[in-house]
Image (cartoon, grey):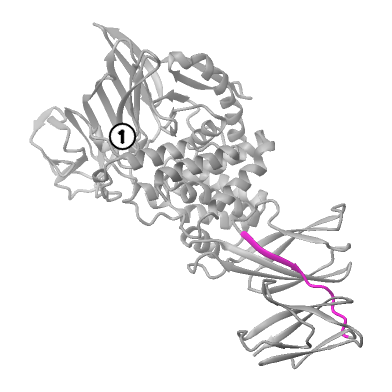
Amino acid sequence: MNRHLFIILVFLHSFANGQDLSYDLQKIALQESRPKSHLVSFKENSSYSETNFIYQRMEWQIDPAVRYISGEVTSYFKWTSINADTLYFDLHQNLEVDSVFWDDQKIEFAHYDNKIKIPVINTPVSGQIDSVSIFYQGVPPSSGFGSFETSTHGTEAVPVLWTLSEPYGAMEWWPCKQSLADKIDSIDVFVTTPEQYRTASNGVLISDVIKENKRTMHWKHRHPIATYLVAIAATNYATYSDTLHMQDGSIIDILNYIYPEKLEEVKNQTSVSLEIMQFYNQLVDIYPFADEKYGNAQFGWSGGMEHQTMSFMGGFSFNLIAHEMAHQWFGDYITLASWQDIWLNEGFATYMNALAIENLKPEEWKNWKKSTVTNIVSRAGGSVFAVDTTNVNRIFDYRLTYQKASYLLHMLRWILGDDAFFSGLRNYYHDPAVANGFARTPDFQRHMEAAGDTTLQEFFNDWLYGEGYPVYSLTYQQTSTEDLSITLSQTSSTSVVDFFEMPVPLRLYNSDSTQTMEIRLNHVQNDQNFHINPGFAVAEIVINPDYWLISKTDEIVSVPVLSNSQFEIYPNPVKNKLTLKLESGTSVLSMSIYSIKGKQLNRVTTTKRHLDVSSLKAGTYILQVQTDKGLLNQKFIKY
């Protein structure tokens, strides 16, 4: 199918289901529009282990009307190795480095292969702090989702400039350590523009000075930050704050930088930020950057990007606000240590968004689950774990990285129960080994296993590293209101995982739905039999009624109770031909053969008492005979 047609179809489906996909569709569309030469391989966590960046001061000069940047970036770093003879920075070779200073000494350097290579002028001492200043300028290239972009907004076509470095775009507009191994402990950002523009960035606004028709805004951020989360956006912003008052008397400032022509419209939309922030505070812990701010800066596409303390927003729907805000806990405070584990960012933010729906907009909760599962099972394969991190499309695959990853968390909640699941989530968030740092999947898995007092390796093997989902079939037979026999079977949508060991939820109904029963079957082997005491005559069974699982249902078949005085088949087991023995005066109208999973294999209209089964494979089957006195069933074995 044409990819652009697919985008339209996904949008129409999601619109019909009330789901906001603007963020992800914009990412897909932008990535499709990029020349393929921009989809370059980037080696994650390149060799920078000899230094720990403790502070960077960025001083930039930009004009939103012009695609150009010049500036100075000063980096303070602590040596962790005494054997280094070269210091490396990442910077795209399209940008020109004017000079490099080591402390106050101008030194030689090399700039090629998108790296600045600076010779170490003195033998490093472990723990020693040095600084390097890099002066540069040029027209940045743009990859990913637009690492450095200019556009316009409003009827007067006012210029706007923004950056979005995820995943590999930081080096395309500033000299940095593009790594998922070392957060910058602290930054100061100074941006000088023509005076009519304001700049949004990370942290707290310290000063806003106009001098000689130029405006310089200084933002200070004093929390560790991953390189790709540093960002600036500039245009003729109007500003206002939504303020969350905390029980202890403190406040959290939610600062909004909005296009002036959209100001009144957006004010009505962002007020929900307070409710969402309060919910996340209670669910996980107080917003991790509460001493500075949370911000929204409008920019030039319909999605959003979770820049630390200042999300860039193309719109202000409930779902987009909830998703980007959630990233401040999972994505920013705790950041993925490899793009292979992108689900730790996007899956968590998507599920936090879903939890906000469950608790703040409960009328939409079932629809979110239904539409999400429907889209996940629309294709058979695909792993949540992103093996190929050179393919940006794969990293941000909407069905896998967002939806299936979020449902992995939802299924963990089903397996462990709410108390253990949310306890494990909070323990993961508070783990000093990952707090303000980087995490991999085993870090999260360890906390979930401890909270649930169980092992989850099989679960993660199947659902994170594996592919596909189970397709369930069920047969049931009830001999009395106290005895219901259920046989539960499954096939896998792919061959990667042959069996999904899962607790499977069922709902039983009587004939007029006045009596129901919820049961949970621990499905650990195929064609597994269970005996239940429902206490009423069961007329219908539904698998996964509340969408706890990623699954499909094939067939559910009721097997009537047999009457041996009326019906007998022989030989059983049989090789070629079955013979029926019926009560005298009973006429055969038709015969059907079903698989043990309840799938009809054939149907014969006949008055004969013999049936050829030679073409069947060896196994167990159900013979159903329609007579003039009723419907009869019997199992038989073919060998």
- Residue drawn 55% across the image and 53% down it: 408
**527 over 511 or under it: above or below:** below
Specify whether residue 280 is painted magenta: no
Tell which residue pokes out farthest to the top in this image.
Answer: 212
Q: Quadrant of residue 282?
A: top right
Image coordinates of residue 506 in percent, x first then y, are 73, 59
Task: Inspect this view and state whether residue 85 appears.
Answer: yes
Q: Would you place residue 165 above or below residue 496 in this image?
A: above
> What residue is at 31 percent from the left and 51 percent from the top?
390
Residue position marked by numbered label 1 in the rendering: 147
Identified by mark 1, the residue type is Ser
Q: Which residues are magenta?
A: 552-564
Instruction: Say whether residue 88 is left or right of residue 168.
Output: left
> For the image shown, how many numbered marks are present on the structure?
1
Asked where in the image residue 173 lies, by quadrant, the reply is top left
Tell me: 228 left or right of 498.
left
In this image, 480 relative to 125: left or right?
A: right
| Spot occupied by residue 515 in the image (x, y as percentages of width and height) | 86, 54
